[in-house]
Amino acid sequence: MYLAMNRFTVPLENAAEFEELWLSRESRLQDMDGFVSFHMLKGPEEDGRVLYASHTVWDSEEKFRAWTTSEEFRASHARAGQSRKLHEGVPRFEGFQSIQAIDALQPA
């Protein structure tokens, strides 16, 4: 498993617009081989800023890298530069390889 994460620091006054941008965007992730799940997470508010993190889970890093060079990636990010910048700086990317997995037991 590979987890790809981007963290965004958003001024509080931009938080509602930032969330709406994410909630209304067209995702092409489900069309990609190896895609497992996506989560947009809202973290704590501190000093007038809110921390957000987008997480995608993939079968492998290779499948994630294929996504970043795909037509689906370009299409889903085409509007990224058209809206006003709602977060500070650039998103911070972090990628993680799974070394252990513990899943909830499925009910019988």
Image (cartoon, helix red, strand yellow):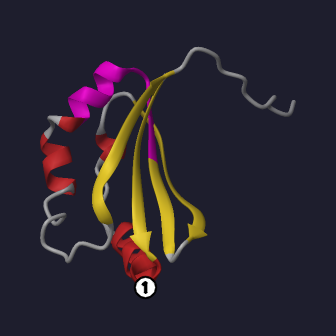
State which quarter of the image contains the C terminus.
top right
Relative image position of residue 46 (x, y in whole percent): 57, 69
Which structural element holds mark 1? helix
For the point 78% across and 31% down, the residue is 104
Q: In the shown orientation, is residue 53 left or right of residue 92?
A: right
For the point 66% across and 21% down, the residue is 101
Relative image position of residue 16 (x, y in whole percent): 45, 81
The magenta-colored residue range is 55-67
Q: Mark 1 — residue?
A: 13
Q: In the shown orientation, is residue 85 left or right of residue 3?
A: left
The quadrant holding residue 31 is: top left
Instruction: Determine whether 83 is above or below 26 in the image.
Output: below
Find out whether residue 47 is within the magenta segment.
no
Relative image position of residue 9 (x, y in whole percent): 41, 62
For the point 29% across and 20% down, the residue is 62
Relative image position of residue 60 (x, y in whole percent): 39, 20
Seen as rendered, the residue at the extreme bottom is 13
Tally of marks = 1
- Badge 1 crowding class, 10 Å Cα cut-off, few under 14, some 14 to 19, many 20 or more, is few
The quadrant holding residue 88 is: bottom left
Observer-nearest of 23 and 5: 5
Observer-nearest of 107 and 15: 15
The quadrant holding residue 15 is: bottom left
Find out whether residue 59 is within the magenta segment.
yes
Observer-nearest of 38 and 52: 52
Q: Which amino acid does label 1 sit on?
A: Glu
